[in-house]
Image (tube, rainbow, N blue to C red):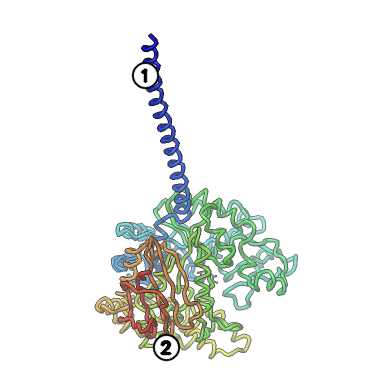
Amino acid sequence: MSFINKNINESYNFKFLIYFMFKQIFTVAILITVLMISCNNSTNQTDQNTINSKQEKWWKEAVVYQIYPRSFMDSNGDGVGDLKGLTGKLDYVKSLGIDIIWLNPIYSSPNADNGYDISNYDDIMKEFGTMDDFNVMLAEMHKRGLKLVMDLVVNHCSDEHEWFKQARSSRTNPYRNYFHWWPAEKGKPPFRPGSFEVDGSGWRFDSLTNSYYLHYFSYKQPDLNWENPKVRSEIFAMMNRWFKKGVDGFRMDVIPFIAKDTTFPVITQKELDKKYEGRWDVYMASGPGLHQYLREMNEQVLSKYDVMTLAEGAGTTKSTAMLLVDPERKELDMSYHFDGVSLGYVPGYFKKMNPNWNLVDFKKIYSDWDSVFAEKGWGTIYLGNHDQPRMVSRWGNDAPEYREASSKMLTTFLLSMRGTPFYYYGDELGMTNIKFDKIEDYRDIETLAEYAKIKNAGGDLKQFIEDQKTGGARDNGRTPMQWNAEANAGFTTGIPWLKVNENKSEINVEAEEKNDNSPLKYFKKMTGLRKDHKDVLVYGKYTLLDKDNPDVYAYTREANGKKVLVLLSFRKNGGSFQLDKMQLGEEWINNMQPLQVKENIISLKPYQACIVELKN
Ligand code: TEU
Ligand code: CA
């Protein structure tokens, strides 16, 4: 019995031992598994976090092509570009390798400021066509996989908009409060600048109701009162209507200007200098309501669609830009700054460009802005648009021997930086400033107003005309697209609304399609490269190298163990770059082969640009 018992006991003990061992192993295994899962989870969590903050989005990977519709293609010979004309050119646009078209305003407008003065947000400008033309155009874009971003101009409308006609009719009209008024019995309103006005004032006296109204731009562009909830809901409803039609986003004109201090305090120059670096655009914008308005907009409109939004960042700075685009704040997606395009102006003159602008400062601006969005948010990059002269004339060199090289170099820059590139129509051809010799050739309200100001002050008008040739005159960037070498560059059979550049005989789509070395072909290569290497060229980390080099802009982009060196000569004397321990690998692109390397020094030819892989 005992034996049996013993046996039983022993066998019991043995079984227990086995059971115990298994249990231990099992527990340890479970513990390890649990630990592993939790570890894994936490790495997943961090990965998730970094992915979240750098979340991939179609609008981050896109190249945006900006079209100034007035100047792209005229279909009916009235000298003004139109929607039908544009629709007919969509195969060309698609062939560029771009993804999104941003169209300047095409809504009904009396055109005091070429569509930035809207008289009806729900209709198409007569000169541009009809709503049917719009529907066809949008369908044709979508058919080709192109998205459409419209311009949203809601800081102001036109004085010919029904809202303003009503508002000005009497002080008790229900629309009165859609705008900002200053009753004349209170005396003159405190100074606010009005761009595009010869007297420089942002207030205009309206005798009908013995009041002044506010207009940050011309008197034909009265500012809307965003403090009025009715204004906000009208605008949100209008945006919803356009999104329901299928548009893919909005570029928001001077959006920080919608919120301002409407007690209109007097500000001294000293205060302006001290608190706002002397910048009116900062002082007049980004008022307390701004982020509330944008969050409402996001909630009531933007969050309902997969769309892209871009703040034209007038009045924002590096420290306030993130407030607009931090994804967690649920406002907008991207913004664009003016620091880059404001560089090099001679103080005290209207957009007079210093020909010896400083490349070191240029690099610092773009590098600092890259770091603003390094962890979250997303930036943009551009060198030209409808408010700027042509990029090759301003930042490159439009002399015949350097024009092609320097425009390719600038294209390399724009398409190899982090941030969504905004590329202006015609820059792919290397189109240049038109450099008008007489004021009669200009059409732009801004240039005409500045000219009149100088004339009234008895200033140097000749000098002004000279300065506008390289500096800022906006019409330099608005001349008709150069399709071929024929009369009016194939843009119109009539008289173009703005003169066509004489250099159309060499600089045009037809000629550049035939030439494998043209800026046009180069642009297509660059859009392809950005797509093929989106990990590095879109999302990759950016690092500035050799920051004090006065001639060369050098940086690396890297991701997932891959790293490239971007070298850009911004000067007609070329420039050099010290490789140190860097080992060059495969060349991705080069606007002027070969790359000269001797004893670890790369010598760049004038305006040479290349992207080359680094082995270490
Ligand atoms: O421009 C905004 C702006 O800040 C302008 O003052 C711009 O800096 C100016 O054109 C530079 O000379 C936007 C539009 O892009 C512009 O075309 C409009 O004229 C303006 O708003 C008013 O809507
Ligand atoms: Ca037309």
Label 1 crowding class (10 Å Cα cut-off): few <14, some 14-19, many 20+?
A: few
**Circle 2 is placed at which residue position?**
573
Task: Report, in whole angstroms, how far the alpha carbon at label 2 lies from the one at label 1.
Answer: 94 Å
Q: Which mark is residue 266?
A: none
Secondary element at tag 1? helix
Residue 69 in view (yes/no): no
In percent of width and height, residue 389 lies at 46, 78
- What residue is at 41 percent from the left and 81 percent from the top? 569
Quarter of the image where the C terminus is located:
bottom left
Q: Quadrant of residue 315?
A: bottom right
Q: In the image, is 193 to the left or to the right of 462?
A: right
In percent of width and height, residue 118 lies at 50, 64
Q: Of the residues under marks 2 and 1, which one precedes in the sequence?
A: 1
Residue type marked 1: Ser
In percent of width and height, residue 458 lies at 62, 89
Residue type marked 2: Asn
Q: Residue furthest front?
A: 3
Q: Quadrant of residue 259?
A: bottom right
* Vertical side of 39 occupied by 492: above or below: below
In percent of width and height, residue 111 lies at 48, 70
Q: Quadrant of residue 220?
A: bottom right
* Vertical side of 44 occupied by 611: above or below: below
Q: Which mark is residue 11?
A: 1
Quarter of the image where the N terminus is located:
top left
Give the camera-side residue of 80 and 613.
613
Label 2 crowding class (10 Å Cα cut-off): few <14, some 14-19, many 20+?
A: few
